[in-house]
Image (tube, helix red, strand yellow):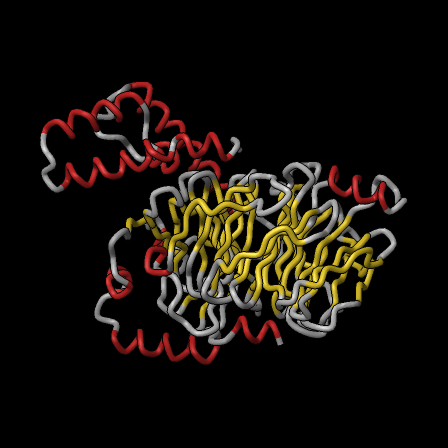
């Protein structure tokens, strides 16, 4: 990820590119058309690079060969995921909903509405530590990189191999836990219920927190002092993620903000862009919850709907990716791992839970994974083993470890892999659409079905985020 200063250099070109395209569509004249052709000839656009679409006039044999190779690679990847096998193990110990999970080496750390943080040893599927200390439900977790853990370990006279975990809670505290000794080594009082947090590995390091009132705060990792507080959003901050020097925050009203971390002692965050819920087409539901996952110039968004949104954060252009073939499907979380985009989906009508897999960067549908009596998936963590196999952890009503099995083995998996052809080729542009337009694009003549969906959503997922904070 390049520094934010380099990212900003391309911003004017990106805006000019978008403006010229609009003017040419409106009959802006031959001069603008020639200028745009020059830009297209000099540099392939982001959409052509990221989504592997054929550029206008793309008769270049090398480009055609590259597309053919990509298609062959995609078909091979799709075939492998259609045969994927996973063994599932339930980790029992929490007494309430699991709201957040994170993976550290061979350990899984989970936070729950029961106010505890638990550490699990994955190979044996046993509880390793029970970290009790919060007086409110745990809402978010983050794992600082090893080099930042070593710095803190030295100041605390602990082993250089010590790993730390950050936990945020409705009790207005961020706690820092040493995993090997199972103790809280630092507690930060934020004066607000903590609803999201992330660690930014830049310079001395920063802890970025979000509150139920829409506030974004920055804390120095070296001194643990508050160095910035911003009233950034109108409603609760439900997701915060970092990407290099950039910080992305999403809120319950559907807004997304992009910040540059300037590594200053005071006020390190500078707002680059803010896109409201009217732009992202998210929000509009009481107690909603937006989760996000950034990748380059794009941010993948999930907001309890039957599709994923893709926000191009420089220009505000929005695409949508169908994540369920029915209007009664809701997406609770989105995650990226090892070239995969994974979206959870829960069917409010029949109670079926699935994980939908898409290839990156093209966002092409691969397969869907499910199992009998699968609970609704609210949070997700993933990593690769030394042999390159996938291990995932999903949380919600149950905490479940997914362990990928060799495809050539005789052991039968616990997961059913299947394809839903209705999810193929569903990356749609929605810039300028109204919310009603989006509904009718995919689902026509469904007035009764839409009313039923809204009724089910209000009873099943309305106020979900407030429920987590209780």
> Seen from this angle, which residue lies furthest right?
157
For residue 2, side relative to residue 391 (left or right):
left
Percent of width and height locating residue 466: 55, 74
> Seen from this angle, which residue lies furthest front?
266
Asked whether residue 316 appears in the rendered view, the answer is yes
Is 200 or 98 nearer to us in this picture? Answer: 200
Q: Which residue is drawn at 66% across and 61% down?
A: 400
For residue 123, side relative to residue 279 (left or right):
right
Above or below 38: residue 342? below
Is 213 or 286 nearer to us in this picture? Answer: 213
* The C terminus lies in quadrant: bottom right
Q: Which residue is drawn at 45% across and 50% down?
A: 300
Percent of width and height locating residue 188: 72, 59
**Disc count in the image?**
0
Above or below 30: residue 211? below
Please identify the quarter of the rendering in which residue 226 is found.
bottom right
For residue 49, side relative to residue 237 (left or right):
left
Q: Residue at x 48, y 38 (%)?
A: 77
For residue 199, side relative to residue 181 (left or right):
left
Percent of width and height locating residue 38: 23, 22
Asked whether residue 404 appears in the rendered view, the answer is no
Q: Residue at x 70, y 46 (%)?
A: 144
Percent of width and height locating residue 438: 28, 61
Please identify the quarter of the rendering in which residue 305 is found.
bottom left
Above or below 263: residue 55? above
């Amino acid at each position: 990820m390049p520094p934010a200063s380099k990212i900003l250099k391309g911003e004017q070109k990106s805006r000019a590119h978008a403006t010229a395209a609009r003017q040419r569509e409106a009959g802006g004249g031959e001069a603008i058309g020639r200028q745009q052709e020059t830009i297209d000839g000099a540099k392939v656009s982001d959409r052509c690079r990221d989504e592997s679409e054929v550029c206008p006039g793309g008769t270049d044999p090398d480009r055609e060969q590259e597309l053919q190779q990509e298609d062959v690679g995609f078909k091979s990847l799709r075939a492998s995921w259609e045969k994927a096998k996973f063994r599932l193990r339930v980790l029992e110990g929490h007494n309430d909903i699991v709201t957040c999970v994170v993976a550290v080496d061979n350990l899984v750390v989970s936070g729950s509405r029961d106010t505890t943080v638990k550490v699990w040893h994955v190979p044996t599927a046993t509880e390793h530590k029970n970290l009790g200390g919060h007086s409110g439900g745990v809402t978010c977790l983050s794992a600082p990189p090893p080099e930042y853990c070593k710095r803190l370990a030295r100041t605390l006279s602990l082993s250089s191999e010590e790993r730390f975990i950050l936990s945020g809670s409705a009790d207005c505290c961020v706690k820092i836990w040493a995993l090997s000794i199972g103790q809280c080594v630092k507690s930060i009082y934020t004066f607000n219920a903590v609803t999201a947090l992330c660690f930014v590995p830049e310079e001395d390091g920063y802890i970025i927190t979000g509150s139920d009132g829409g506030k974004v705060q920055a804390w120095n990792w070296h001194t643990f002092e508050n160095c910035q507080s911003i009233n950034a959003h109108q409603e609760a901050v439900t997701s915060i993620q970092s990407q290099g020097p950039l910080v992305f925050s999403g809120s319950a009203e559907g807004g997304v903000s992009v910040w540059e971390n300037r590594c200053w002692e005071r006020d390190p965050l500078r707002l680059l862009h803010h896109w409201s819920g009217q732009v992202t087409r998210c929000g509009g539901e009481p107690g909603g919850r937006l989760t996000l996952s950034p990748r380059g110039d794009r941010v993948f968004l999930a907001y309890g709907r039957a599709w994923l949104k893709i926000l191009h954060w420089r220009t505000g252009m929005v695409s949508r990716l169908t994540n369920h073939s029915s209007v009664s499907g809701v997406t609770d979380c989105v995650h990226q791992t090892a070239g995969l985009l994974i979206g959870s989906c829960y069917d409010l009508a029949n109670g079926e839970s699935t994980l939908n897999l898409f290839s990156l960067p093209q966002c092409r549908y691969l397969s869907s994974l499910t199992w009998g009596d699968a609970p609704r998936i609210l949070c997700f963590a993933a990593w690769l083993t030394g042999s390159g196999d996938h291990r995932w952890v999903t949380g919600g009503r149950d905490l479940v470890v997914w362990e990928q099995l060799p495809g050539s083995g005789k052991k039968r998996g616990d997961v059913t892999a299947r394809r839903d052809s209705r999810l193929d080729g569903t990356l749609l542009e929605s810039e300028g659409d109204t919310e009603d337009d989006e509904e009718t694009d995919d689902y026509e003549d469904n007035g009764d079905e839409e009313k039923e969906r809204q009724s089910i959503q209000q009873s099943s997922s309305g106020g979900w985020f407030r429920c987590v904070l209780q």
